[in-house]
Image: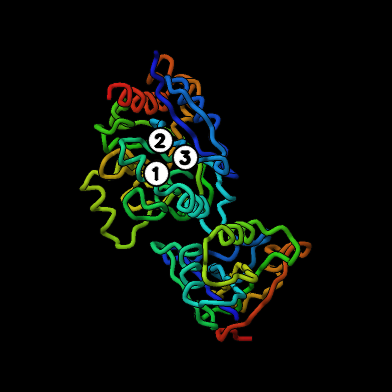
Amino acid sequence: MEKWITAILLKFPGTNCDEETERALQSVGFKTEIWPFTLVEPTRIKNVDLIVLAGGFSYGDYIMAGKLAQLNIQQKLQNSLNEFCHQGGFLLGICNGFQILMRLGLLPQGSLISNTTHRFMCQWVELNNKAQQSPFLKGLPSSFELPIAHAEGRLVTQAPKQAETYLKEGNVTLTYTQNINGSAYSIAGMQDASGQVFGLMPHPERFLYKEHHYDPDWAGDSEWGWGYYFFKGIYDHIEAM
Amino acid sequence: MQYSIEIRNRFIQKQKTNTLLYTPLKSRGAYEQTRRYTINYSGNKKALKNFVREVLVDEVSEVVSSSLSPAMQNFQFYIDVSLKPGTLNLEKEYILNYYQQLQAPDFELQECTIAQRTYIKSESESGDLLPEPFIRDMVNPVIHTWNIQYGTSRTS
């Protein structure tokens, strides 16, 4: 019997990037389901390979972006998520999902706050790949472009030097080549020590096909955008396990 | 009993007041914003404080003041803007919903009022800033209530 590699997307009130993220996951081979958070049973996540927290504005970004989703996950799923990661499961947070993972303490301590521009920023950015061994990034070049769309993407840490430590210890996976939002050390993505929990502010699902690129003559790949290789990397990694 | 806190982000710098307004003013000014929560409760105050810190505060980036005096100094005036009672207040709904799901919280949360506080500071030698343009552009009188308090740096 064929073994499917499964990914589920947790959908909170206000999550709005779940469908395009699901499409991206399916394009690389994942069998996917979108689960409204109120219907999630802790026992159901046991048999899943990848849990995705997609982008959007969970719970209207009230209090702070990702805060209420964090509280609700803690109340309902925290132990199951810890167990899921302990058993080798992968956890991905994109944009709002990254904010939630950060607040949950599943990534090194920090917070994603308002951009220094004090504006919602929606543009393409160039990124440095700082973790080419990461299952998510191993199919990507040393620098590549993805779109961002966020108001609260500036990473700050309790102590000023903490972000430098994350950089030295390999927790930082992506940095902006130009620091567009004031993030400490231009950090755009992080992972935990195991590499299983991965969060990033840019949206890989929005650059699935080459036609998604703003330059119609973009020649990075004949068919796919960099986002495809982001999701393909984790799919291939799980398949090879 | 009542418990009030004011929360401000320690990383966010003051901004130009004209970014709040549709029509720029000649007088230069700066503003900073905080969130103020006033909670009516009964029961264990320590349990309430723990709840407040857990739910409303980001320990990495925010600082909390539970004093009755304003969290900021040297302002010309501040404006508290809240949703009117009876208006759908989703932030409040989500907070109360989270509270209701707690098992044995050891306190009863009876009411929660949320206000966004905007401190206005004059940076102009040509004169003080007046609250009216800010009220006009920041407040929707259909759904909001507001309150103005003047500070010590007022010169006229």
Q: Position of residue A197 (x, y in %)?
A: 34, 41
What amino acid does circle 1 point to? Answer: Leu
> Of marks 1 and 2, which one's residue comes earlier in the chain?
2
Instruction: Give the residue at x 41% y 47%.
Output: A101
Evaluate if marks 3 and 1 touch, with contact meaning CB atoms under 8 Å apart. no
Query: What whole-number distance in Å separates the C-alpha atoms at marks 3 and 2?
Result: 16 Å
Q: Secondary structure at mark 1?
A: helix
Chain on which label 3 sits? A
Task: Relative to B108, say whether B12 is above or below.
Answer: above
Residue extending farthest left: A168
Q: Nearer the viewer, mark 3 or mark 2?
A: 2
Q: Position of residue B12 (x, y in %)?
A: 45, 63
Residue extending farthest right: B142
Please name the residue that numbered disc 2 is placed on.
A46
Chain on which label 1 sits? A
Residue B88 - label:
none
Which image quadrant is residue A81 in?
top left
Residues indicated by labels 1 and 2 sit on the same polypeptide chain: yes
Q: Position of residue B112 (x, y in %)?
A: 63, 69
Name the quadrant of the N terminus of chain B.
bottom right
Chain on which label 2 sits? A
Evaluate if marks 3 and 2 touch, with contact meaning CB atoms under 8 Å apart. no
> Of marks 3 and 2, which one's residue comes earlier in the chain?
2
Please name the residue that numbered disc 3 is placed on.
A53
Query: What whole-number distance in Å separates the C-alpha atoms at marks 3 and 1?
Result: 12 Å
Query: What whole-number distance in Å separates the C-alpha atoms at marks 1 and 2?
Result: 9 Å
Please name the residue that numbered disc 1 is placed on.
A81
Q: Position of residue A134 (x, y in %)?
A: 28, 33
What amino acid does circle 3 point to? Answer: Leu
